[in-house]
Amino acid sequence: MALVQMHDMLRHAYENKYAVGSFDVVSMDFLQGVINAAEQCRAPVILGLAEPYSDHFDMELLATAVESAARRSSVPVAIHYDHGSSVEGVIRGIRHGCNGVMIDASDRSLDENIATTKEVVQIAHACGVPVEAELGYVPDNGNDLIFTTVDEARGFVRLTGVDFLAVSIGTVHGRFKGKPRLDYPRLRHINEALQIPLVLHGSSGLSDDQLHRLIANGIAKVNCFTAITDRAVELLRRNARSKDEGYMKLVTGIHEEMEKEATRLMRIWGCAGRAAEVMEQCHPWQGVDYVLKFNLPDVDSDEMAIITRRGRQIMLQIPGVREIKVSETLNGNNTSPQYCWQVSLASVEVVEYLKQHPEFIKFTRRYINDRATNLTNTIYRINQIG
């Protein structure tokens, strides 16, 4: 299993002065290209599921493929929920298998950014998931750029407890117009004040030297999307000029082109060849199954269906709960069936969070604890998927 703790991965990058690429994945071509590049380079990698692009794909369907690819990879992989705009979005990201999340409230007031980020940190940390936030504003153009200040960054991290910080030091999302003017002294001072992994958004258009200088001053995670898509678009245009206009001809070579660009970037960022040492330093990311077994005498199938439906509705709203499977068996001569609820959780940390959650307590007291016999509800096992 190569799905590892994202906090461990980025801490290693930060302490050893290289950066891990975080590639937002929007299709199977992206996924295959990026994973192949990481395998070939022997590089740790972060696969991103970006909320702003979610209108273009089925998040749950793609997340399943991303998690499968991560677990079968031979290099360290983390899965990141990118640019979440709300607490609810971040909770969905964790449910879809992300073991790192970003809450982006940088377009709001500082007080709102702090309050929203703090709430996300409390929830995500209870699930064992680290949090990235953004301070300052990295726009889609250079007109509304708001730089991160050292004092605000220091106070923001102290008040929120965020694990990683995306900083605004002169880059923009998308394609850069003109020559980027990066504020290296600002970045250096922020790094000296915080001593946590810093994140670069808007890396497209930067030279190798600029990237090296940014990484030397605390950047440990580089987000990438535009550079990959531009290479793919160029190939699509070349393929479209072919006399053969079939779909398969049009998309031929797309993931290979993405692999080439991802490989080039991984080498620039310094993460190529780091897979083995990162794997040694990172804890695996493993889900757990929390199991409830019980009998409910005098409950018919219709009432049990209501209880099951209500239980799913409540528990799937609790952060860190990913899936619920319900089964029943007849226990020996007992005509009352034994019910087994297998609740898949994002991590072992969620076990206690679930047991102490007021909605879970209220539900189990009303429908199960006070009426069940042969109840066991403290069993959990490590989920060794993949």
Image (cartoon, helix red, strand yellow):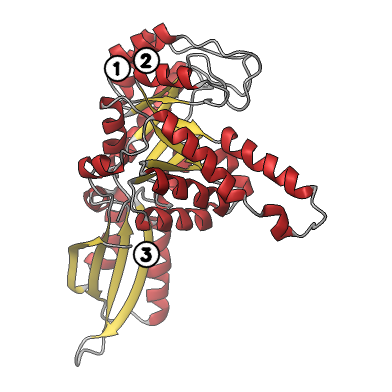
Mark 2 and mark 1: span between their CA atoms?
8 Å
In this rendering, the answer to whether 118 lies above or below 312 is above
Mark 3 and mark 1: span between their CA atoms?
40 Å
Lower position in the chain sequence, tag 2 or tag 1: 2
Residue 81: name its quadrant. Answer: top left
Lower position in the chain sequence, tag 3 or tag 1: 1
Give the residue at the far bottom of this rendering. 333
**Dot 1: what SS?**
helix
Nearer the observer: mark 3 or 1; the answer is 1
Give the labeled residue for mark 1: 194
Give the labeled residue for mark 3: 324
Amino acid type indicated by mark 2:
Ala
**Dot 3: what SS?**
strand
Give the labeled residue for mark 2: 153
Q: Residue at x 48, y 29 (%)?
A: 104
Amino acid type indicated by mark 1:
Leu
